[in-house]
Amino acid sequence: MKRTPLSRTIIPPLRKIRRLNLSEYWIAISGAVIIIVVSLMAILAPLIAPYDPIETVGDSLEPPNTRFLLGTDNIGRDILSRIIYGSRISLSIAFLASIISMIIGASLGLLSGYIGGTFDTTLALIMDSMYAFPSIILAIAIAYVLGPGILNVTISIGIVYIPVYFRMIRSEVLSTKESLYVEAARAIGASDRVILLKYILPNVTASLPVVFSLNATDAILIEAALSFLGLGLPAPTPDWGFDLKNGYHFITAGYWWPVTFPGLMIIITALGFSLLSEGLSEILNPRLREV
Amino acid sequence: MKCLLNINELKVYYFTRRGVVRAVDGVSLNISRGEVLGLVGESGSGKSTLGISLLGLVPPPGRVVGGSIIFDGIELTKLSADEFAKIRGRRISMIFQDPMTSLNPLMKIGDHLMETIMIHENIPKNEARERSIKALEEVGIPPERFNDYPHQFSGGMRQRVMIALAILLNPDLIIADEPTTALDVIVQAQIIDLLNNLRKQYNMSILLISHDIGVVSEIADKIAVMYAGHLVEMADVDVIFKDPLHPYTSALLRAVPLIESKYEKLYYIPGSPPDLVNPPKGCRFHPRCPHATDICRTREPRTVSIEDHIVKCWMYCDTYE
């Protein structure tokens, strides 16, 4: 048997993308570039950070200068180093929280849509009532109950976004399970497990990347908000939200740098995820593509 | 010929909010081994429901409420879900109407075939692969297309894949639900030829469901006509064409357009199929029947058989009893 060329085995949407000009996807690409840069910053933090982020290395509130490129905070810690280390916290919480909500939300949505009946109605009701809360309020409530700490913040953000995945996957499953190929799979004697995993799951996951990066955007913002409110991470940990709150006390006295730089990082990272999500949805959904 | 499938007084109802839809209401028929039975009727006559009930896949709110389906000695209506799954695809398989949507768009066609084998048989992957390739060859698909996705195939080719899937495990019975309806005429003929060759080769029985009596007559040995959930007539294909007894069957035959037809206008049966929540009293065809009499409007006719010719019409109850 002849070997099939690789290009013919790649799934259909990807093949379409390859044929198109990359410059059409500048939105997704710029988002991806931002996220890659921030991720590299997080991974290489010990190599690129000039100082230890939790050590007092200079005078209190030194303005940006050649020794401390972005200045120091009120107890003389290097803001640049704190920002670099802070990206580790922000990104890992954003990714972990989004992965938690994706796994739980998508599997519940898959089961709920497939099984249907009372199980589905009950689950949908619970999810809808969770969805009715503004996400930040729900996150605050859960974080308050769980107490501060990286894991708890991750869990509370993760729980808040479960309904987003649940609703999306469930509605896709509801239409996919009626499709003829699912009926055909039944007609060849496929079990529910095989139908769910091989016939339905691959066909309902197309919008997951879009929702995932949108979710990560929110996760970054909520994590910052929780830390800002003191529900996030304990004190010396370098964290953008925490530093924002810390610097905020001094802004009225004219010290602008402790609050500006962590704030900028939050904005840039959130922007990166949001551009990626927008760009991905444009790639994956041809109806949004500009002609 | 040995009887393979015996359907007796089968009743499949859909319990909808509007009421009970009696989609299949007391149908009895037999299919022998190696025989092709053409099941014809209008949309909504219950022919597809009958077909799907043989696989135990009547979608909710539908349910088999009565009668029996005996397949090679097994009572299908009493099987558990697990036992039924072992029969599906292996002993009874199905070809669907729309080949464009009956394959998983994200699964290579080779995987479709291998999946079917692996579900039912515990054999090594490469063996499953060889058998899949062989099945593809039998339906006229070159082996190098094994790793292609459904969207890379035309409608006719996809229907060939569906047929390969259906014959893969050498089933005793294939239910073909409108297998050619979504295809153009040339491809229709090819697919029908293919089905005909395969069934001769493997001695399979086929239940060919179609609204197109012309297509059915190409390969069917017998034809059964359904109307509004009832089986109204069943006979050998030549008999049906030469000597249709039921007024509905003759109307159906007249409605087949012929190029050399002497009729200027296309003939159609006036009226529309009845609402199966509230079927007409008596014979269900009486509102559209040119021969309807008082008894047709009040009492349901019995099914009478004249040798191998079965008909459910008052015109024959009197004459032949």
Image (tube, coloured by chain):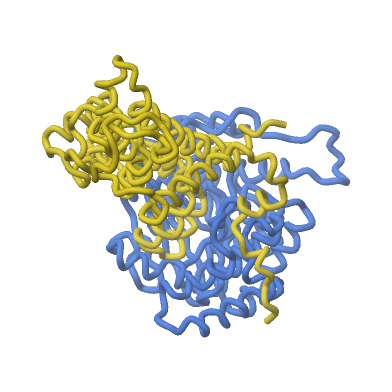
Left or right? Give the position of B94 relative to B21.
Answer: right
Q: Nearer the viewer, residue A203 or B64?
A: A203
* A171 shown above or below B7: above
From the viewer's side, name the closer residue of A236 and B117.
A236
**Residue closest to the eye, A204 or B321:** A204
Which residue sits at x=85%, y=33%? Answer: B264
Seen in the picture, residue B255 relative to B197 is either above or below; the reply is above
The answer to whether one can see residue A118 in this image is yes
**Front residue of B61 and B251:** B61
B3 w.r.t. B231: above or below:
below
- Where residue A231 appears, x then y in whole percent? 18, 33
Tell me the residue at 52%/83% (across/down): B126
Where's residue B280, x and y in %?
Answer: 45, 30
* Residue farthest top in this picture: A252
**Residue drawn at (61%, 32%) of the image:** A288
Regarding residue B300, the answer to whether it shows in the image is: no
Q: How many numbered discs, if any?
A: 0
Q: Position of residue B247 (x, y in %)?
A: 62, 41
Residue shown at 65% from the left, 34% from the top: A289
Chain B drawing hue: blue
Pinpoint residue B315: horizontal percent, then vertical percent. Answer: 55, 42
Q: Which chain is yellow?
A: A
Q: Is residue B293 left or right of residue B152?
A: left
Classify residue B43 as left or right of residue B301. Answer: right
Residue B299: which quarter of the image? top left
Quarter of image, res B308: bottom right
